[in-house]
Image (cartoon, rainbow, N blue to C red):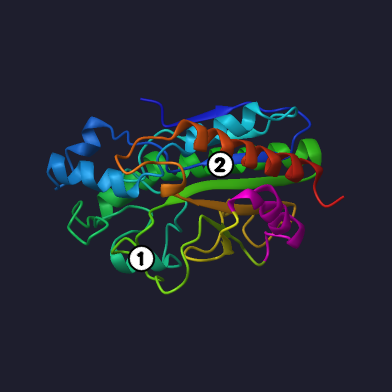
Amino acid sequence: MNTRTLMTGDASSPVIVHVPHASRAIPREIRSTLTVTDDQLAAELDETTDAHTDVIAQHAAQSVTARPWVLRNDLSRLVVDPERFPDEREELNAVGRGAVYTRTCNGDVLRRDDVAARDALLDTYFHPYAAAMSDLVTERIAATGRAVIIDVHSYPAQPSAYELHTDGPRPALCIGTDPHHTPPWLCEAVYAAFSPLGDIDTDSPFEGTYVPLDRYRTDLRASSVMIELRRDCYIDETGQLVDIAAENLGAMLGRLVEAADRGSR
């Protein structure tokens, strides 16, 4: 079972499209450690998987002349979540949703809270994934002088029980930013690229964006913005992908890729 896929982009492109949560795949040996039933697991995967964001990213990559680099996590975030802090900095540790989840979206026990097992998962999956992303950013900076990460996610129309911040709006597109790594021009580029959606907000209901920890708040050559698409914008009430909606969102994401490639110039 592949743990991740790197899709090669244009040598001159600084853009990395990151798709961390699109997969439902869980290795058999890890499934055996999860305490939920098959039905509970299916429901958890339905709620927590950023379904079809890989399809949208692929549409975007195919729509542009200078292809971005695409890093896709091929394992479910229930194995490890590569975007969480692996230490006490992660606020979602409080609800069992840190780098290694111990609780489901609704608070049921997902796996035993075992330090040795957690460390083994981090060593086997989290740290190698982080190293792959760090290497990719390093390569893009070496080749182009900068790296621009577009971090692609989705979220449900109704808040999940684990969410810590549910008072704000839940727009069609939430833009996640970091005060150090999301320059104003990049945020403006997202608004422009996704303007057909109309319903756009910043850092609500989710804030922040992914930057490799070895460059986090130390290397501003790495910039990043998070794209959180509300799932009912492209998935119907039966959970099926609406193809034309995915294609349209892919075209919008492609326009953002082109803007990121041009940068602030």
- The answer to which of 141 and 176 lies nearer the viewer is 176
Note whether 259 is above or below 65 in the view shown: below
Q: CA distance from mark 1 to mark 2?
A: 22 Å
| Residue found 83% across the figure and 52% down from its top | 264
Q: Position of residue 60 (x, y in %)?
A: 61, 34
The residue indicated by pointer 2 is 18
| Residue found 72% across the figure and 38% down from its top | 140
Crowd tier of the residue under label 1, counting other residues whose Cα lies within 10 Å: few below 14, some 14–19, many 20 or above: some
Q: Is residue 227 left or right of residue 81?
A: right
Whether 182 is among the magenta residues is: yes
Q: Is residue 37 visible?
A: yes
Q: Position of residue 139 (x, y in %)?
A: 70, 36
The residue indicated by pointer 1 is 163
Inspect the image, locate mark 2, and give the three-letter code of the amino acid beneath it.
His
Q: Position of residue 104 (x, y in %)?
A: 24, 55
Judged by its main secondary structure, the magenta piece is helix
Whether 225 is among the magenta residues is: no
- The answer to which of 192 and 46 lies nearer the viewer is 192
Inspect the image, locate mark 1, and give the three-letter code of the amino acid beneath it.
Glu
Q: Position of residue 195 (x, y in %)?
A: 66, 52
| Residue found 62% across the figure and 58% down from its top | 216
